[in-house]
């Protein structure tokens, strides 16, 4: 017969016949045989305890029943009022009270120096016409958007700075060639449209179309040769190269640059004043057309300088009485007679409007 420790004996007493023992063998207890009508519970067994006394062991284990306890709600403060949410609805919006922490606004992007800004102003406008989805349409876009007028302004800046650095000479030459090519294409495009309106013969119209196409091809070649429209994938467009040059160029101070520009324009007027022109000729030699070309560059340069040169108030007295009427003449409203101010030039040079 197996012998178990006294504390385990009571648990298996009713299942098998065992002998319980502690530190010493206790009296052997035989279980009461079961009957068919009623099962007699096993008597409690005793065994000597660790201190020499006997401790009774109960064979049946009473299960522990836990009574559920309702959770205690957290205390609320006057600022925190418990709310109930209805299924399917959004929770109430809790407004955060304003604080005294100042809001730090982001700094605006740095503006380029006036010397650079006067170039970038015109490059931005020209790039909008060049960077179209279909490069094949660039000639017509340049023509319809009157890009030649924009190019005149940056070409005028090239005239002022071209002897300062080879980069400015390259700028002048590239935009001069582009302006010439646009002018040639624009001339034949205008002639063709005028011929269509006037109902010229088919032979004349065919010649006008052929000349326009030749002008378009010349313009495309100029755009490719000067890299305004790169012919190789991955090549950098000239306008991007030009921006990099302007950024990396070591510019003089604003004051020194201003003095340089004024001196260049004064020298140009002095040359125009002392040159000999033959006004008996309209187109040939130093005739009226050549005089007009040289004279208009001063107006283009003034406009191209992007606010460095502006006009005095309209009511400023004209120093030449015979020119006083010009202030109210239609010529005073042409694009080169209007010189708008610029935020990048806070201290502009002002000219008398009648001049």
Image (spheres, rainbow, N blue to C red):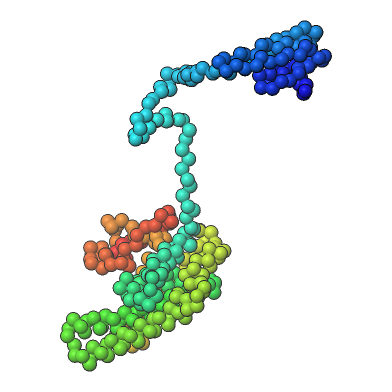
Question: Taking 181 as reference, is 5 left or right?
Answer: right
Relative image position of residue 242 (x, y in whole percent)? 50, 69
Question: Taking 216 as reference, is 7 left or right?
Answer: right
Say which residue appears at 18% left-offset and 88% top-offset. 200
Q: Can residue 11 be seen in this snapshot?
A: no
Q: Can residue 354 be seen in this snapshot?
A: yes
Q: Residue furthest front?
A: 36
Q: Residue furthest top?
A: 53
Q: Nearer the viewer, residue 131 or 51?
A: 51
Query: To which quarter of the image does residue 329 belong?
Result: bottom left
Say which residue appears at 33% left-offset and 57% top-offset. 312
Relative image position of residue 212 (x, y in whole percent)? 31, 85
Q: Nearer the viewer, residue 315 or 71?
A: 71
Q: Residue furthest right?
A: 24
Say which residue appears at 33% left-offset and 81% top-offset. 185
Rendered position, 353 above or below 191: above
Query: To which quarter of the image does residue 7 belong?
Result: top right
Rendered position, 321 above or below 4: below
Relative image position of residue 173 (x, y in whole percent)? 46, 77
Quadrant for the C terminus in the image:
bottom left
Q: How many marks?
A: 0
Q: Residue furthest left?
A: 199
């Amino acid at each position: 017969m197996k012998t178990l420790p006294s504390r385990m004996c009571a648990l298996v007493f009713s299942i098998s016949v065992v002998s319980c023992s502690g530190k010493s063998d206790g009296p052997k207890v035989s279980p009461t045989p079961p009957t068919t009508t009623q099962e007699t519970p096993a008597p409690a067994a005793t065994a000597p305890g660790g201190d020499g006394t006997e401790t009774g062991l109960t064979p049946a284990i009473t299960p522990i029943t836990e009574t559920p306890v309702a959770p205690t709600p957290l205390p609320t403060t006057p600022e925190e009022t418990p709310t109930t949410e209805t299924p399917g609805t959004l929770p109430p919006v809790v407004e955060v009270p304003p604080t005294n922490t100042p809001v730090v606004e982001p700094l605006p992007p740095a503006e380029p120096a006036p010397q650079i800004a006067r170039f970038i102003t015109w490059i931005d406008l020209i790039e909008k016409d060049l960077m179209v989805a279909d490069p094949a349409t660039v000639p017509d876009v340049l023509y319809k958007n009157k890009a030649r007028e924009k190019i005149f302004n940056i070409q005028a800046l090239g005239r002022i700075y071209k002897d300062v650095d080879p980069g400015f000479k390259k700028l002048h030459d590239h935009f001069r060639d582009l302006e010439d090519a646009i002018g040639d294409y624009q001339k034949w495009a205008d002639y063709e449209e005028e011929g269509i309106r006037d109902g010229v013969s088919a032979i004349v119209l065919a010649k006008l179309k052929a000349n326009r196409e030749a002008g378009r091809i010349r313009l495309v070649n100029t755009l490719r040769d000067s890299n305004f429209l790169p012919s190789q994938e991955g090549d950098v467009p000239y306008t991007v190269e030009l921006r990099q040059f302007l950024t990396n160029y070591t510019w003089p101070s604003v004051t020194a640059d201003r003095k340089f520009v004024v001196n260049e324009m004064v020298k140009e007027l002095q040359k125009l004043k002392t040159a000999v022109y033959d006004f008996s000729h309209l187109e040939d030699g130093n005739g009226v057309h050549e005089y007009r070309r040289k004279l208009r560059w001063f107006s283009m340069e003034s406009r191209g300088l992007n606010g460095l040169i502006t006009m005095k108030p309209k009511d400023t007295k004209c120093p030449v009485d015979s020119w006083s009427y010009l202030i109210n003449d239609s010529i005073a409203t042409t694009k080169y007679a209007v010189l708008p101010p610029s935020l990048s030039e806070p201290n502009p040079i002002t000219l008398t409007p009648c001049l």
